[in-house]
Amino acid sequence: MLSVHEPLARRGRSHPAARFALVSVLIIAVLECVMFNLPYWTGVAASTDSPATLNTMGSGLVREASGTLEVTDQTKAFLSVPVDGSSHYVRLDLAQVTGAAGTTRSRIVSVVRVRLDSDGRAGSSTLVDISQPRSLYLRTDAKHMVKLWIQAPAGTQVPIFAVRPNVRVAFQVDWLRVAVMAAIAVLIACWRPRSALWHIRVNPASAAQRLAFFAVMAVVGVISLTGAAIIATIWKPLVFQAPNGYTYDFDQYGHIADALLQGKVWLDLPVSSTFAQSANPYDPALRERLLDAGGSPIYWDYAFYHGHWYSYFGVIPAIILFVPYQALSHVIDGMPAMLPSASAVLVFLFGFVLFGSLLTIRMLRHVAPNCSVAAMSMALVTLLLGSNVGYLWLRTNFYSVPIAASLMFTTLGLWLWAGAERPEGSRRLWHVGDAPGLSLPRLACGAACIAANAGCRPTFALSALLIFPMFWRQIRQMARLVRARKATRQLLAGPAAVILPAIAVVIPVCVYNALRFGSLFNFGNSYQITVNDMTSYSEPVANIPWIIGYYLLLPPRLQSTFPFVAINPTPLPHWGFAEPMVAGLFAMCPMALLAFLIPLLRRHRRERFGALFSCMLMLGIAIMLVDAFKAGLGWRYICDFGWLITLASLPGLLWMLGELPEQGVTGGTGDTGTHALESGRMTGRWQRFALDTRRTLIMLLLLASILFLLASCFVTGRDDSLQRSAPDIFARIQAWFSLLG
């Protein structure tokens, strides 16, 4: 099935795996039945006295005929009830809502924030979702009185009947929690130092390994494409109009596609005459005055130029996905009119996972031909963590579309280039001098993919510079022949295979720019309607060191309550765009720091790929500087350079894992004497211990990074937090920890 360094004693290896599986099952069972059900075990002696009818209701609440509570005054919206201290828990009893009219029901919320005070001591705010029974239990250390504050605006109706004190918490097995623990156990089983996967080398020629890889990718693909299809079927226009404020329309790519289908380059959006005729529509103060005077609509974060609305985001994602979808929607009855941005993001991110994984495998196979399956799987997870795609998976609006598309196109293009050197005897190879032959179709397709970044996220187009370290031998041979005046027409085939496809992709994008903004290279970002006049704004130089520090070194901000991490403020000396983040790249993915080991790994460099990793590190830093100067500080902008720095770190990761050539884990002195043999055994044992320690450290760092990524999805204050987008999931997982104290 899988090729092995040497024949394995399978009989001896099966027992440790079985023992590990058995121990894992026992640990999960104990954690689930004992630790996560401590509220049940500690509440067995609860008195269950003090009936809920003894609740005292604050004057800021009114009991409706339907049974719900309506908030009339936030400062007095509370329920209080005495407790006897026999239980650390109270429960929110739900009202049986009856006879409510449609208009009344529309005001009833199923998710509400509450705060439980204990004996006069203020508690912390907690999210309650009536669809999650476990979230209805609240922990308290009160001995006499609890007071529940309902933190909702006036007019809100909540289906809460009363607070019931002194309750016993029900025993519960949460299969989602069990699945999470099982997934962690599987990762530990694969990555622990004595895992059998360390003895199996990656072999792309193995049919079994190919089947396993594409089975994993098929699971990711089915989940992604199914999610994209479901989101597309429930699409509704994402347009929000603030009173005397901006219009927020999140269907930018849908509008681009509609405009292209109509043969127009501007968006079919209404234009306010007072706004269009204003002296400077890019002046934020002037726009505020126009909005106060009723000069709507003014579309937030759209580009406005010469009386028309435009999008300054890349057009190629619209051409690839949105135009075909919306063309079909015009002829198929019942099909939603626009493709949601979230659907496109999921499709492009699946493409990145697939091609990014293929690129990583191809590159690391050149660096470490005998790389193990365990080490390769660690490298693939590291790439996903360092590329910041977890942020894009959660924030699936139009901002993420061009970034996700560029990640896919760039990794696809580099994968094609990395495989352009073919074995002698392959068909249609281009040769120059004594350099290895190259596949012209792979060169051409790779160049077209890299060039597509001009119509997605132009920053990624700088990855075209990686062609120099990847094909330096061929470039050097071409230069030698040109200097010797031995150049032939056949010599031009290679450069033409790169340049012509790139031009074929870039020229239509440039023409599209010229038709909109009168310049081939003007993408319209200077005309965006945002917090500043972008036609004259430039990032203050004093901000740049701070932005770079935040991008790379911003430490995590931990807290004692769920989700245990919090948004980190990112102040700057002067005003500039600065999005709060949970941490910088090296905190979110500590393995990325290994990129700086590249100078120490020179003896392990193999052919073109040694220089390639160094150039990736330098290019990643250069793109980070471009982002700092041009865009400021944005959590999503880590995607621009994080993948490059992380790829550059992978040789260092393999070195830490003992996977590079010439890294032995056992050894002797060459002396046949007894003392020398014993010394060699001791040296081998210490080397084995050191290697196991390093592998354990990397495993723990990866697991911590994965948990940190998951926790960051729940933090308050980030855009598209699960607290807002999926409150039922938030409340369910919050209850795992909040009831433990």
Image (spheres, helix red, strand yellow):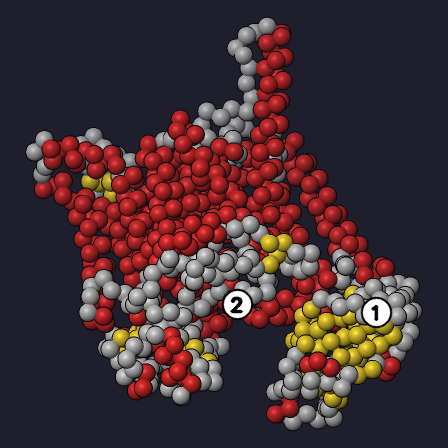
Residue 700 visible here: yes
Q: Position of 281 compared to 37: left or right? A: left
Of circles 2 and 1, which is in front?
Answer: 1
Indicate the secondary structure of the residue bearing disc 1: loop
Q: Position of 359 compared to 198: left or right? A: left
Between 635 and 358, the one nearer to me in the picture:
635
Between 236 and 83, the one nearer to me in the picture:
83
Quarter placement of the C terminus? bottom right
Residue extending furthest toward the left = 485
Residue 349 spot, x, y in % from top left: 43, 59
Residue 134 visible here: no
Give the amino acid at mark 1.
Asp
Q: Within 10 Å of the Cα at label 1, are there few (<14), some (14-19), or many (20+) other Cα atoms?
A: some
Residue 488 spot, x, y in % from top left: 9, 38
Q: Residue at x 84, y 67 (%)?
A: 142
Residue 702 spot, x, y in % from top left: 56, 45
In the depicted structure, whether residue 24 falls above or below residue 534 = above
Q: Are marks 2 and 1 in contact (CB under 8 Å)?
A: no
Which quadrant would residue 191 be assigned to in this image? top right
Q: Position of 358 compared to 85: left or right? A: left
The residue at which mark 2 appears reads as 720
Residue 107 spot, x, y in % from top left: 63, 86
In the depicted structure, whether residue 701 falls above or below residue 199 = below
Q: Residue at x 71, y 93 (%)?
A: 99
Q: Residue at x 58, y 35 (%)?
A: 695
The residue at which mark 1 appears reads as 119
Q: Within 10 Å of the Cα at label 2, are there few (<14), some (14-19), or many (20+) other Cα atoms?
A: some
Q: Residue at x 76, y 59 (%)?
A: 740
How far apart, in angstroms, are the residues tagged by discs 2 and 1?
35 Å
